[in-house]
Amino acid sequence: MAQGQGWNPAIAFRGAGEIFAPADEGAGAALALELARAAPRPLHEHALKEVKDERAFLWVQDASAIRAGGRPFLPGLPRDLAHRLIHVTARTAEDALFALEEGVRCRDLAFVIGEIAGNPRALDFTASRRLVLAAERHRVPLWLVRVDARRDLGAARMRWDVRSAASQPSRWNPQAPGLPGWRGELFRARGLRPGAWWIRPEPAHADGGGDGEAILSARPVDRDAADQRSHAQSARAGDLVRAAVDRSLAAG
Amino acid sequence: MPPTSDRTPNRRVLAIWCARLSIDRWRQAETSGGEEPDTPLALIIETAHGPRITATTRAAEAAGVRTGTMLADARAICPALEVRPADPAGDLAFLERLAVWAQRWGPWSALDPPDGVIVDITGAAHLFGGEQRLLDDAARVSRARGLSVRLAIAPTAGAAWALAHFGAVRAGTGGLVLAEGEDIEASLAQLPIAALRLDDDVLLVLRRLGLKRLGDLDGIGRDALSRRFRNRRSAMANPLMRRDQMIGLVPEPMLPVVETPPAMVQLRLMEPIRHLPLLETVLSDLAAAMMRKLEGRGEGARRLELACWRVDGEVVIRTLELAASTRDAAHVCRLFAERIATIDAGLGIEMARLVTRWAEPLQLAQADLDASAQVHGTSLAACVDRLTSRLGAQAVRRPVAHASHVPERAQRWQAPLAPLPAGQESFAFHARPLKLLDRAEMIAVLYATPDGLPQRFRWRDKVHDVMRAEGPERIAPEWWREKGSARLRDYYRIEDREGRRFWIYRLGLIGDGRGNAPDWYMQGLFA
C-alpha cells in the first residue's frame, strides 16, 4: 500500500467489500461509490489507460433500504457515473442477492453496488461467501452497503463501518457544508491492519466535475481524538488531509 | 412509388378500390360468403357522441341510411335497421394481406387506406395479354374472392385512384384504362373535384367557390389557387399539389408493402412427450435451429413465442421478450427454462413450434478468439434479461434527466438499454443530494421566523442540531403544471453536529396567502 496523499484504500481491490452504515445518512452509499470509483476495473487486461470507461454499473436496493434511505438521485451523482447507472429495485433481500450475483457475473459492468437493510436471514455467511467468490472469479468489484445492520458473520474481504464526519469548510461560504468527509473504521481486512480513518475525496476532483479516477485521501484517526471527536476538531483535521500518513496500512 | 420527377409516360399503375370492403368482410364472416341479406343492416362504430354508421348494405342504402350518420338518426329513417359492430383494425389487416396478394399483377404494391390498394404494373401487363385483359382477370378473381372492386389503370397513382372511384365503367369490362400517351388532364376533366383525394373541409371550400369538376380548376389561374391555399402544407389539404401529383408533375411517395414472414421452426415428435427434460431438449433443438435461421437473415430475436400442441387438442403458448436482440441459443433456453417449467403436458406434447414475433437487425460479428478465452461472464443484455425475467421489467431501470426544476420530477426512469434522450446538462453550481427519499418526510424544525436558517430539527424521532447551513435556494412551483395554490419551496443544505448532511425544504412562506404556517420536509441525503 502506498503512503502519502495518493493513498487509496481500495487499490487493486477485486473482490467484495461490505460497508456498515446507518440508514439516515448518505455516507454508506457515497463511500461505496467512491471506493468503487477509486479502484477502476480495467476495460481489458492490457488496455490503454486513456480509453474512458463508459461501462454501466449496477445499483441494487431492497425495498426496506429504499424506504429508509431513498433512491439514487441523478443530478447528485458524480458526473462521470450519472449516465451509467442501472438501478434494480428488489422486493426482498433474496431478490437483491440474486440481482447482486447476476451483476458480478456480468462482464460489461464496471462495478456493482448493493444496499440491503438489516440482517435478513437470506444474507447469511454462505450467501455472502457465494457473492465474494463470484465477484473474485469474474473480477467485478462489489460493494455491499449494510444499512442499519449489526456486524454479523461475513466473508467480505474488506469490512468497513462508516459514519458521516464533519465536512471541510467550504471555500466560499464558511457557514455552508463543504466537501464531504467520512469516518471509516476498517474492522476486518485481508492483508491490511484494521484501523479507523478519516476519509474524504480529494478536492481537485470533487469540484472539478469528477472526470477521471477519483482519489480518496485517508488519515488515521488518533485514538484519543476519536473518542472526543467534535466538530471543531474534525474541521481542523480537514486541514491535515494532505499531511503524510504516519502509519502504513499494510500489515507488518 | 419510386419518385418520378417529371412525366414518365412508361409508368403504369393499377388502383384497386374495394368499394364495400367492410360489408364484404362482414358477409364472408357471418353468412359464409352468401348474398347480402334483404333486411337493412349497418356496421357501427362507437364514438364519443354515440354509435355512428360506417358501412351499410344495399338494402339499408335503399331505405335511406347513409354512411357517416349517427345511428339514432338512421333509426328514425329506417326503424328496422339491424346493426353489427364494425372492425376497422380487421379491415386494415385484411387490406395488408390483399396488398400482398395483389402483387400477382405487378411486382410492387402499396396500401391506400382505408379501402384501396395501389399496384405498380409497369412492364407486367403483357404477361396477362394486355392491360384490358389484366383488368378483366383482376375483376374476375376479386369477384371470386367475394370482393366488389372497381379497378383502373393510369400513368399515376392519383389518376388511377380518381378513375377507380369516379370513372364510369362500361358494362362487360373489368375497369377503366387511361391509355399511354393520353393527356391525363383532359381525360379526367369531367370527374368531380372529390377525385383529388382531398380533406372534407377543403372539398367544402372548393364546392363553395363553385368548383365542382376537375376541369373547373383550369379556368382559374394557378396563382389564385396557390394564394387561397398557401397555408395548407399537406398534400391532402392542397388541391394544387394533389392535381400535380395526379398529372405526374410532382412525385407521390408511397410506402411499399413488403411481406416478411416471421422466422419459424417446428418439430413434430414421434412420441408425445410428457416430461420436462425431454421438452428442454426439444427446446434447445428448436432454439439452435431458430438461431441458424436468424443468422441467415441477419437478424436477432427480440420476442419469441413457443407453442406446444398437446395430444388432447390444447395449445400451450409461452412468450419471451429480450432486452436486446440476440442469437444466443443457450441464453434463450435458460430464460425459457423458468417458463416451460409451468407447462402442463396433459397426455403429452406432440408438436412444438418456435416463432420469432419480433426480430431486429443484428449483424454478424466475428468472435474475438483471444478475448473469449479470457473474458467470461455474461453480457449486459443477458444480465438485464435475467434480472427482468425474475424481478419484472419495472424493477430494472435507469434514471434519465427530465426538464423540471422540482427535484422529484427532475429524473425519470426508463428501460435500462433504451437509448438516452438528448438533454441539457444540469447546472454544476447547484449542489444536489446523492439520494432522494421516495416521499419527502415532514420534520419539525426550529428556526428564526419568518425565514431564518434552521437551528435544530427532529426527523424520525431523532433530534439533530444544525451546525452548518446554506440556503435558501428557492424553487418556485411550476405554474404551467401545478395548481395556482402550489407553494414555493426554500431548500437548505444543512449539516448536523455528527456531520450528517441533509437536504430539507420549507414549503411556502409565512403570509403568502396559501395556507397556514409553512411545513418543513426532509427530502434528500448528501454524500
Image (cartoon, rainbow, N blue to C red):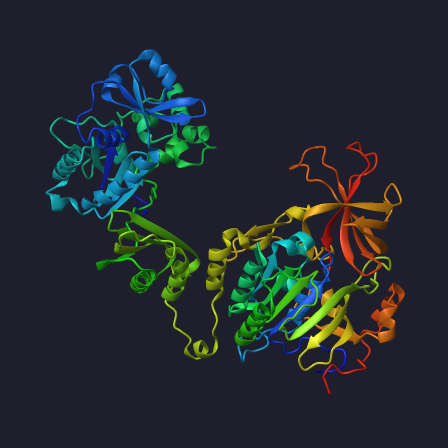
Q: Is residue B213 left or right of residue B376?
A: left
Where's residue A42, x and y in %?
A: 57, 75
Q: Quadrant of the C terminus of chain B?
A: bottom right
Where's residue B507, x and y in %?
A: 77, 41
On screen, residue B177 above or below B354: above
Residue drawn 66% across and 66% down?
A33
Residue drawn 33% across and 32% down?
B87
Task: Residue B208: name its quadrant.
Answer: top left
Query: Does the image show residue A72?
Result: no
Residue drawn 77% across and 46% down?
B505
Task: Residue A19: name its quadrant.
Answer: bottom right
Residue drawn 42% across and 22% down?
B50
Task: Residue A66: name its quadrant.
Answer: bottom right
Task: Work out which residue is located at the far bottom of the displayed protein and give it.
Answer: A252
Depth check: give the residue in front, B159 or B114.
B114
Where's residue B165, x and y in %?
A: 26, 29
Depth check: give the residue in front, A6 or B264.
B264
Q: Is residue B526 left or right of residue B517?
A: left
Q: Quadrant of the N terminus of chain B?
A: top left
Query: Does the image show residue A6?
Result: yes
Depth check: give the residue in front, B358 or B305.
B305
Q: How many callouts does the rendering have?
A: 0
Where's residue B376, x and y in %?
A: 47, 74
On screen, residue B165 above or below B96: above
Depth check: give the residue in front, B468 or A189.
A189
